[in-house]
Image (cartoon, rainbow, N blue to C red):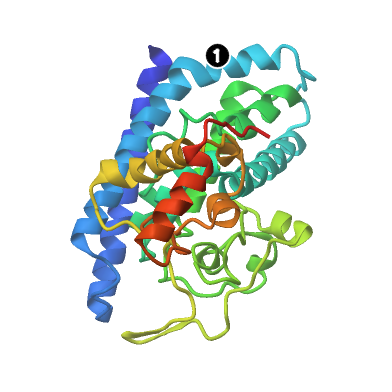
Amino acid sequence: MEDLLHAIGFILTFGLFFLAIILIEAFYWQKKGRKDAYHLKETLANIATGGLYKIIDGIAIALFIQFFYEYVRQYGFKYEAQHGLLSILFLFLASEFFFYIYHLTMHKVRWFWAIHVTHHSSKTMNFSTALRQNFLMDLNFGWVMWWIPLAIIGFDKNWALIAIELSLAYQFFLHTEAIGRLGPFEWVFNTPAHHRVHHGCKADQIDRNFGGVLIIWDRLFGTFAEEPATYKMAGRKKIVDIEYGLTSRQPTSLNPLRLNLDEFFQMFKDVFRYRDLRIFYKAPNFVEQEYQADPERGIPSNSLDTNEQDQGLNDSPAAKNTLKVV
């Protein structure tokens, strides 16, 4: 119960702080004449999804994540933090590295992307976008890739929690167009410029810049992309070379539940239609590549008329009593 109360207190404290920052940024853009920077209905939807996510996240940490962490830790390397700043640095680097792996996996595997897609579905970039998260995040067990390696190493549960929450708090400030380039700081650390690229949906911006606080892992592993030199703010006018949002199935509703659940349900619809369990662990666009499915999931893109469409359905894996697994 004490852990749950701590989680609620943390959520309320940071929640109020983030809301204040959002209001300040909205006021800033209003004064600058950028009326398209914030949309009230979308902002409210972002806050609602963020609230749902953080409530479930706090409950999950208090009720089962921390216990699973301690259970795994007793069988790990049992690292003892006895070296002051060096131990803190070790924890920081380990946490950031495993977040990089976790974040990359969220983009590469449909099961995790079906949850993370909520965060990328906004067509605008502002501090409220940072709150646009999915309440199923902890229930699809993606957190195992971030939390459990730290447990195996042997970091204290409370210190691991602090490292993870501070990383997430830092990432809130990456979601803005109000901050430009930051010079040499960008060589090592993730910045709003780097993260704007991450949210871009153009071909050269997709699956780039996965880092949390640090950008060094992207530079080391070839997933880094620089913000286009032509992207800049010029008074009231934004010279755009980054387009935010999704390449397909862009949400048409701001209902927080639909923002959270539509793509998750679409994944199960695809598995049912094509009778292929690989859809769960293959790339998000696997169905389009393997079955030439319409990215918008309307009429199949390779259909020419009703007869051909019917014939295609009769010959499709969904019409056969088979289930692909490997």
Residue appearing at x 31%, y 43% in the figure: 49
Which residue is identified by label 1?
67
Residue sitting farthest toward the left? 41
Against 145, residue 156 (above or below) is: above
Number of on-image labels: 1
Q: In this view, does 64 lie to the left or right of 28?
A: right
Which residue is located at x 60 percent, y 29 percent? 144
Task: Using the rendered image of the protein, determine whether residue 46 is visible from the camera's viewpoint.
Answer: yes
Side of 261 where 230 appears, left or right = right
Image point (46%, 42%), residue name = 270
Instruction: Determine the residue positioned at 51% across, 46% down.
Output: 316
Please state if 289 lies on the left or on the right of 252 as rendered.
right
In which image quadrant can residue 268 be found? top left
Count residues near mark 1 (Cα–Cα under 10 Å), then give few for <14, some for 14-19, many for 20+.
few
Q: Residue 293's x, y, as percent?
A: 48, 56
Element carrying mark 1: helix
Identify the amino acid type marked 1. Phe
Q: Nearer the viewer, residue 252 or 196?
A: 252
Q: Is residue 16 at least partly visible in the picture?
A: no
Q: Which of 250 and 241 is in front in this view?
A: 250
On the image, the x and y values in percent for residue 133 come to 39, 45
Q: Is residue 136 above or below residue 25?
A: above
Find residue 244 and report its horizontal and vertical position in percent. 43, 67
Instruction: Name the quadrant containing residue 152.
Output: top right
Q: Which of 303 and 230 is in front in this view?
A: 303
Q: Is residue 137 above or below residue 231?
A: above
Left or right of residue 222, residue 213 in this image: left
Image quadrant occupied by the C terminus:
top right
Position above or below: 63 against 131: above
Percent coordinates x, y for residue 214 in the rendering? 65, 54
